[in-house]
Amino acid sequence: MTLLSLDHLTVQIGNLAILRDVSLKLARGEILGLVGESGSGKSMSALAVMGLLPDRARISGDIILGGVNLRHRSERQMCQLRGNDISMIFQEPMSALNPMMSIGDQVAETLMLHRKMPRSEARAIAREKLDRVGLRAPRFPLSLYPHELSGGQRQRVAIAMAIALHPKLLIADEPTTALDVTTQAEVLDLLRDLAREEGMALILITHDLAVVAGMADRVAVMQAGQIVETASTEPLFRTPRALYTQALLAASTHQPPPARRASAKPLLQVENATRTYPLPRPSAFAPHPELRAVDDVSFTIHAGESLGLVGESGCGKSTLTRAILGLDALQGGAIHLDGHPISPAIPSAQRANMQIVFQDPYGSFNPRQRVERLICEPFHLTGRPTDWRDRVAEALREVGLSPDDKTRFIHEFSGGQRQRIAIARALIIRPKLIVLDEAVSALDVQVRAQVLDLLSHLQATHDLAYLFISHDLSVVRAVTSRCLVMQAGKIVEEGPTEALFTAPQNPYTQSLIAATPRIPQHWKEPA
Amino acid sequence: MKLSLVIGGVLSAAALLAALVSLVWTPYDVGALDIAHKLQGPSAAHWLGTDHFGRDIASMLMAGARTSLAVALVAVTIGMGLGVPLGLWAAARRGSWIDEGIMRANDLIFAFPALVIAILITATFGPSATNAIIAIGIFNIPVFARVTRAGALSLWQLDYIRAAQVAGKNRARISGEHILPNIANLLIVQGTIQFSLGILAEAGLSYVGLGAQPPTPSWGRMLAESQTMVALAPHVAIMPGLAIVLTVLGLNLLGDGLRDALDPRLRGRLA
């Protein structure tokens, strides 16, 4: 029985068509995966259902929920509906909760608002709902505040709030994108169970095809405001009909050409690196306890090699990276690059041997400088050569941009182009090692595949070594030859990537790999 | 072009022009008394009328603009010149004793009521425009230091700062090259607000007799002198009041417009 149907829904903001002729049907208790790249209209479709589109949006077509056309509902009626019949959870668990309100009160608030319940009764139901999402009583009292919870636990609170009134439809907009893989698996399991056991329909919006493969009954693929294909999950993955779906699938399993064999010459040597931070004193006169953020870490990167470093947030990856780049000092151990010791005081010539590419294509550049100036910043280390303009043009050409782009500002470029510019900036002084800190994590699958190809090509032509830091195991698997797994400041497993992924030895590695969503292998073969 | 930028620019330019022209020419001599024509309304001879000594109000307003703008400008320059580097320094050494020292010293200045200190300074060193400038300027320092530090702290978290560190640049260089241009819009907006507050403060100090001394013309003192005659000749009070209001309004609109115009991300949309 149909719960929600979108009928030729079209949304325009100004002259821009956000959604074009979107038609969808969703049955009670069904899980629909809505996939597409950024800007394809996934979130806008969800906001249209919620009646939360910006005021200047012009809408045509129908949104029918349980036989009622939401398009002709007043804002007041929509407020009644939101939370009650439809609910939504968002990507960022950090900003979805009010930091000044205890989790019990936040869940109870919805109940008091919609059901006019007394506070004590609402808090009793809140307790029940928090138990339901796995935050059980003695360990998670209602009096906790959001900052006392981890990202995954906060997302559970957000889910408890969303299901407090037992809505018929829950919309989850990239609910696990900001979470670590093991937490992601838990939250996805919870959402699936809720849909199954409580008969709640779920629209799961994501860019990650592998997440959809394990969750959804049906999948709708969006591109540029249109739905290009809708089908049951398995047939869609086995025999995608739309060209765009085929391209997305190909990109998500894309394997860049393998690197040449790395030389035996060690480039970066990390020996027993240790970095601690003092924690707040437990009582006034007690000594500071220590957090060993990096704990006795040793590894080697050879010239021209791609080494993967995998671990969840808080495992010490960033601290280790800062030490390798010579931005922070170590308290124990040593790091050598090309035989020279690394510390915050290293001479520029040594520093020029390594560069970094960051995750966020939006925060990586000074918005007030032109591309030319951005790219030649590392020349600060070597002195600006007389042919620097030619070098900038060459670097731009190497990363697949036009030399004419040098006079533009960074906001004129897309996320993928910005990441190319970041690579050009890293490349311009010909370093031997580039640290790729989640460098492709924020990119759409197709763009990601292109950037990975570019990195692989540059590695071959310039004999670069990469330290590839990521929480995304599938990417690490595709591009690295050797891999380290880091947990709580220690390297718990190290080995050739393929062996490590097929036969992980350490229980933590095993749990990481088991939690990684993947498209079932047999779906890729002809039935 | 945005309307606020145009209106703000026109009003601010008018005040500046009046101040500059008064250096070489005013319709009448500012000090010239003409008791026979006192408290006249606006006319062809006296555009904005005359005051209780028969002085030409238009001429006094023009000369007063000079005092107001000069005091406010120098006070903002003092505040920015000391406050911005201190704020940048504090942000670059976040959490260190330097940061603590700078910010607590700021709090100390903030903790004093500004007008009382201004009165103290002028009472100690004698009332004059110069002492008014110093008093207002000192109170601008913590304002700029705080705005600068707050803006800079969030920028220090960004990846392009880390990229600059990887490129071997030191804190001072990063502050000048990457931080300052990106908080310039904050500072311009704060600068225009402080500028207009400076005009108000100068008017306030002159009003209580602690700012510019006669015969230096001042909007604040014009207001003070006219208050007993409000019922008799309201224009004598209204004219300097309007001058203050329009200049302050113009500066605020200008700051608002400049902020948008200086942002390369918004530049395309203004054309």
Image (spheres, coloured by chain):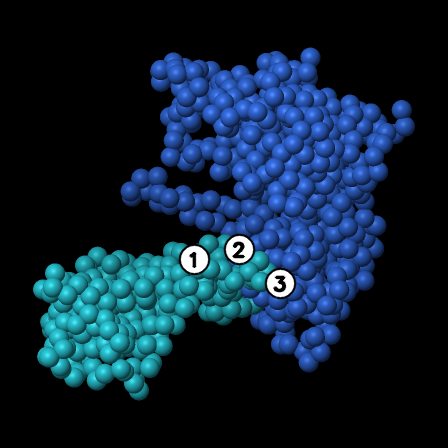
Chain colours: A blue, B cyan
Q: Nearer the viewer, mark 1 or mark 2?
A: 1
As helix, strand or loop, the secondary structure at mark 3 comes to loop
Q: Position of residue A133 (x, y in %)?
A: 53, 21
Which of discs 1 and 3 lies nearer the camera? The answer is 3
Query: Residue B191 location in percent, x, y?
Result: 37, 65
Q: Residues within 10 Å of mark 3 (few under 14, many from 20)?
A: many
Of the pair A234 and A59, the residue shown nearer to us: A59
Query: Which kind of residue does numbered mark 2 sit on?
Result: Leu
The residue labelled by disc 1 is: B151
Question: How many neighbours does mark 2 have within 10 angstroms: few (below 14), some (14-19), or many (20 or more)?
Answer: some
Q: Give the residue drawn at x 78%, y 39%.
A: A248
Q: Position of residue A193 (x, y in %)?
A: 62, 18
Residue at mark 3: A409
Cα–Cα span, label 1 and label 2:
12 Å
SS class of the residue under badge 2?
loop
Cα–Cα span, label 3 and label 2: 17 Å
Drawn side of residue A288 relative to residue A29, left or right: left
In terms of depth relative to the viewer, which is nearer, A149 or B195?
Answer: B195
Residue A497 picture quarter: top right
Which disc is residue B158 wearing?
2
**Chain of the residue under the numbered disc 3 shown in the image:** A
Chain for disc number 1: B
Residue name at image x 50 percent, y 45 percent: A292
Which callout, 3 or 2, points to the residue nearer the camera? 3
Location of residue A168 by image quarter: top right
Is residue A354 visible in the rendered structure shown here? no
Q: Are marks 1 and 3 on the same chain?
A: no
Contact? badges 3 and 2 (CB < 8 Å): no
Q: Quick one: label 1 or label 2, which is nearer the N terminus?
A: 1
